[in-house]
Image: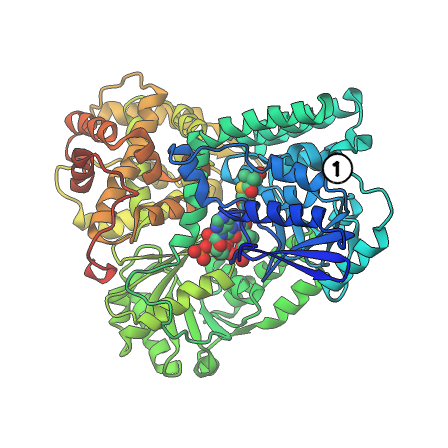
Amino acid sequence: MSDLVQLTKDQDVAIITINNPPVNALGPGVPEGISQAVKEVTQDESVKAAVLMGAGRTFVAGADIKEFGKITSGKTARGAGLLPLLRQIEDCPKPVVMAIHGTAFGGGLELAMSGHHRVGAPDAQVGQPEVKLGIIPGAGGTQRLPRLAGVAKAVEMCAQGNPIPAREALDYGILDRLIEGDLLTGAIAFARAVLGKPAPKTRERNQKLGTPEQNAPIFAAARELARQKQRGMIAPLAAIDAVEAATRLPFDEGCEVERKLFNDCLFSDQSKAFIHVFFGEREVAKIPDIPKETPIIPVNSVAVVGAGTMGGGIAMVFANAGIRVLLKDADPPALDRGMEVIRKNYSSSVRRGRFTQQFVDERLQLIKPVLGYDDFDKVDMAVEAVFEGMQLKKEVFGQLDRGCRPGAILASNTSTLSIDEIASATARPEAVIGTHFFSPANVMRLLEIVRGKASSKAVIATCMQLSKKLGKVGVLVGNCRGFVGNRMFGPYRREAQFLVEEGASIEAVDQALYDFGMAMGPLATGDLAGLDVGWRIRKEFRHLEKPGTRQPFAEDRLCEMGRYGQKTGAGWYKYDENRRAILDPEVVDSLRKWSAEAGIPQRKISPEEIVDRCILALVNEGARILEEGIAVRAVDIDIIYLNGYGFPAYRGGPMWYADTVGLNKVRDRISEFHRQQGELWEPAPLLKRLAQEGKTFAEYHQSQDLTAA
Ligand code: T1G
């Protein structure tokens, strides 16, 4: 037996144990080991039944995702896949009981469903998350799951890709029993209890497949939901087609339909992008010059300075992670308002079923409103979240320097200002770091962790690890104006304004980017965030603008009219009481007038140009950020844009998208804009170099570390 799969016995029950850490993925050698073990179980007359389980922390969490790249690049042929193995298990003349703990996901659940029975630990989960990788179950999952759980549950699990807990799996018939206590002991007892009884083959269990009349509305609703919630994605619709085939065709033919749909998805750009994102979200946690064994500073209590929208949201983030919070505001009414907003947010989470009332009550207990810095000497970390002005931030950091104990982490939630300048207000710059949360802080997953020149490795490592505990995707970025996300968002929104000033309609600009896959168009996004935010920053940095360089004027004008966006009921659009955007003729007329006054020739602009001007503006700035070492890798920029800016995951992020288009084409298109629009479109040197060398952003790893920025 291979060391990946062990075969032992407990008297007349064989135990097949898969041991492929960390998640028992079905990588090379594992299916072969299982097959060999099942063969020996079949031939060994002293064996009456078998239990199959995973060693370590989980049952099988799926096929080995690393293998897909080898298949799509042609390095390895896909072959027959897991189907023959699953058929061998199902046809075993002795009952095979699957014992599930941890996460039986993807191929793991498909393996489990080929068994005759399934038992699970109460905290186990099962799922077919393949659509989150841009593929569908490829080993009979879309054919066996409806036979065990019924069509509606199967199509939901395969199309949406969310796991379900063991209790629900039991209710739907995916599990036959929950095992309290030792799983293996319980599974062996279960195996003995079914000896002599019929061993059901899942592929022959057709009772739950329903009739075409019953199923038609289920598939129609699933397709409609996929079109809305998974807009632009091909895998969810393919998964629905595969489950539908299970209700219409014999098992083997259904598997053939699944196999073709799986292959179509596997070789799609979308799947390559999703797999890039899967590994990317884990890659960003690895910082080249911060060793894994860097000591972590314990963070069990935090002080948040500023009880506004961001401060309140940040206080909730820490409380939700079970960390005690002092929420400080100098102004009693502001502090009361802040606490009121927190209570309202929590109660709406209870109403939506996201949290239980008990969870919320416990979290509220963790948040203590205070007016001063008195107890700051007891906290492990302070997070400043006051108004975005350097003077005020430096005053606060002076207070933190005096009030916090030695060794405490001093973090700023600034979205654009210099961490180094903020740190200069303290005598401990090594303790200062940026923790840029995205609004609403208690919802958005992205956390930009901004490294100052002096930020210590322990402070950086602690914040990177803390982000996972806070349920955030933490990405380390260098210290420059706007860091990574906002620095790139500037040119993106600048181009959107230019396009409107040149004659594109407001709705055409937003629609083009929405159709590209962005969660929201760039102009509507400005209305959501508040046009005054950018207006204030432009005024603060006006003196840095290069004379003679074209600057957008539309949003400044809208702000001068008091049109800040949703917060004032009007910005680019006007908003009804449900915050629904309505085109405003007043703005359309004003734009025409302003553009005429500015002497900007009006022209018809295609959706393709709109997308290229906005998206390639992101890419060009991203290339500069990469070359300056402000981002560690291209994938870091991608992860920032997927988790903080609504970039479509099925395109992998702006840098991955550019690689998919091809850097030669990207360089040529940017050069074209450079000729038309002037120096703002100067192609980034790194882009030109990689295009010249036939390389991709994904391959690029700069030599210098982040502190060089
Ligand atoms: N293949 C390869 N590596 C994997 C992996 C997988 N399926 N799952 C996890 N890893 C690596 C991961 O990259 C990380 O590596 C380490 O394991 C720990 O993971 C045939 C075709 C199981 C819930 O989509 O959801 O089956 O960074 O940090 O937070 O029809 O991993 O340490 O070097 O995420 O405790 C379907 C994907 C595959 C499950 C554990 N299965 N994995 O979460 O740890 S397609 C999935 C997860 C398929 C079939 C189809 C999570 C987890 P490193 P981690 P975690």
Percent coordinates x, y for residue 517 in the rendering:
45, 32
Mark 1 Cα-neighbour bin, 10 Å: few <14, some 14–19, many ≥20:
many
> Which image quadrant is residue 66 in?
top left
Res. 440 visible in picture: no
* Secondary structure of the residue carrying numbered label 1: helix
Visible in this render: residue 177? yes
Q: Is residue 233 above or below residue 7?
A: above
- Decide if residue 175 is on the left or right side of residue 392: right
Image position of 259 with respect to 642: above or below: above
Q: Quadrant of the C terminus?
A: bottom left
Q: Residue furthest left?
A: 547
Q: Residue at x 12, y 37 (%)?
A: 548
Residue for badge 1: 202
Is the N terminus in the top left, top right, bottom left or bottom right quadrant? bottom right
Asked whether, in this view, residue 258 is left or right of residue 581, the answer is right
> Which residue is more in the foreground, 194 or 444?
194
Please state which of residues 348 and 199 is positioned toward the viewer in this rendering: 199
Which amino acid is tagged 1?
Answer: Thr
Q: Is residue 304 left or right of residue 222?
A: left
Q: Is residue 55 left or right of residue 434?
A: right
Name the outermost residue toward the top. Answer: 604
Q: Residue at x 51, y 31 (%)?
A: 233
For ligand 1, tell me if the residue under mark 1 lies within 8 Å. no
At x 19% / y 60%, what residue is drawn? 708
- How many numbered circles does the render carry? 1
- Toward the viewer: 668 or 491? 668
As drawn, 133 above or below 677: below
The quadrant in which residue 5 appears is bottom right
Q: Position of residue 492 (x, y in %)?
A: 31, 37
Image coordinates for residue 686, horizontal then vertical, percent: 18, 42
Residue 674 in picture, x, y percent from top left: 17, 29
